[in-house]
Image (tube, grey):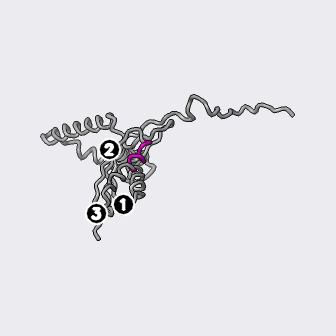
Amino acid sequence: MSQTDTGLSRPAPAGADHPAMPPARTPRRTRGTAALGITLAVLLTAVGVLAVRDALIYADLIGGSPLLHELATAVQGLRPQTWTVVAGVLLGLLGLALLVKALIRSGPKVTVVTAETGVFLRPRDVTRLVETAAEAVDGVLGVRVSATPRRVAVSIRSTGEADVADRVRDTVTQRLEPLATQPAVRVTTERQKR
């Protein structure tokens, strides 16, 4: 019985030069810009809904009085005053500041792991990794960890052994070796009260 080619692609050999997936880009912070964008989108959507409602009223498809027309009529007689110029300048400066903030790339919010395809750890993931490593050291009774992409602070409660801080530092440093950029590790100890 002869084999026929089904046309399906075969997997690349194990020793292929190219990784299975291209490296991922480092995630960037978008918290402030994203929240502002969502707020503006909601406001513009509300104005759009009012505009559609007014259009349906003018087309005699629904009953009621148009809201945007009344608002436009209310502000029609306003004349430029000092407060309006100041408010306009402040709003213009705020808009420029928000535009600059949106265009400038912020620092990464994650720590890069040495890998072919792009693996990243969030600060809370690094915190958990360090906590489990430090808790496994003999003489450690409790651990508190705070982590950023650049530094890790470990506070331990211990039985009072002299070299427990050094052992925790060595263990944590070894656990963080897969990270592309090694954060600075600082360990502080406090003796457990009996």
Left of 69 or right of it: where is 119? Answer: right
Q: Provide the secondary structure element on which disc 1 rests.
A: strand
Q: Which residue is mark 3?
A: 191
Does 175 appear in magenta?
yes
Which mark, residue 132? Answer: none
Q: Earlier in the sequence, mark 3 or mark 2?
A: 2
Task: State which mark lies toward you, 3 or 2.
Answer: 3
* Residue 40 seen in render: no
Image position, residue 37 (x, y; %): 35, 43
Q: Position of residue 149 (x, y in %)?
A: 35, 43
Q: Main secondary structure of the magenta part?
A: helix
Determine the residue positioned at 23% across, 44% down.
75
Placement of 97 over or under 188, stated as above or below: above
Q: Which residue is mark 1?
A: 140
Considering every residue shown, the one lying at the far right of the view is 1
**Which region is colored magenta?**
171-178
- Front in this rendered view, residue 185 or 73: 185
Q: Position of residue 48 (x, y in %)?
A: 39, 44
The residue under label 3 is which amino acid type? Arg
Marks 2 and 3: in contact by CB < 8 Å? Answer: no
For disc 2, the marked residue is 184
Q: Are marks 1 and 3 in contact (CB under 8 Å)?
A: no
